[in-house]
Image (cartoon, rainbow, N blue to C red):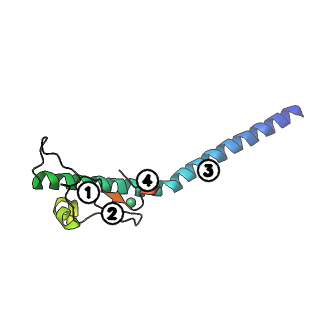
Amino acid sequence: MRHKSVLFINKVILFLAVTGLIISILLDFLSEPQTTNRDSCILNLRMIDSAKVSWILENTDWTEENKPTEQTAREISPSTLTGLLKGGTIPICPDGGTYNLGNSLEDPTCSLSDDGHHL
Ligand SMILES: [Zn+2]
């Protein structure tokens, strides 16, 4: 009798372990799109930042002695970057956030930065 109850408990433990494994795989699979959208947004912000750096290098005479300051920072408009970005357009946040390009001293930001959409 005792042997049967130990066998039953082992089966229950095995069932719970397999069920837990399946649930963890499903949760990981279901949560993946949100992570992918955030990662895509961060990639977009990096592309925008790279385009800004390219534009700054081509259009300013800043040197080691003549460093940019808040007073000399230049505004960056979307039209100045479109020629430097793949496809010729500012990328779009996959979760619907809006991008703020910032000036030449600031990083570009997404309106969903509280959700991890930031550099
Ligand atoms: Zn975003």
Q: Earlier in the sequence, mark 2 or mark 1?
A: 1
* Residue at numbered disc 4: 116
Label 3, label 1: how many angstroms apart (C-alpha)?
38 Å
Q: Which disc number belongs to residue 61?
A: none
Does the residue at mark 3 contact the one at mark 2 (Cβ under 8 Å)? Answer: no
Q: Amino acid at mark 4?
A: Gly
Does the residue at mark 2 contact the one at mark 4 (Cβ under 8 Å)? Answer: no
Horizontal relation, residue 67 to residue 98: left or right: left
* Residue at numbered disc 2: 99
**Mark 3 vs mark 2: in front:** 2
Q: Earlier in the sequence, mark 2 or mark 4?
A: 2
Q: Nearer the viewer, residue 109 or 42?
A: 109
Q: Earlier in the sequence, mark 3 or mark 4?
A: 3
Q: Quadrant of the N terminus?
A: top right
Label 3, label 4: how many angstroms apart (C-alpha)?
25 Å
Horizontal relation, residue 36 to residue 44: left or right: right
Q: Earlier in the sequence, mark 3 or mark 2?
A: 3
* Residue at numbered disc 3: 23
Image quarter for ligand 1: bottom left
Is 95 rendered above or below residue 11?
A: below
Label 3, label 2: how many angstroms apart (C-alpha)?
36 Å
Query: Residue 117's quadrant in the figure?
Result: bottom left
Q: Which residue is the extreme one toward the top?
A: 3
Secondary structure found at label 2: strand
Q: Amino acid at mark 1?
A: Ile
Please rate how many residues cluster around mark 1, counting C-alpha atoms within 10 Å: few if below 14, some from 14 to 19, many from 20. Answer: many
Q: Which disc number belongs to residue 48?
A: 1
Horizontal relation, residue 118 to residue 76: left or right: right
Q: Residue at x 65, y 44 (%)?
A: 18
| Residue 69 place in picture, x, y as percent | 21, 50
Label 4, label 1: how many angstroms apart (C-alpha)?
17 Å
| Residue 24 place in picture, x, y as percent | 59, 48
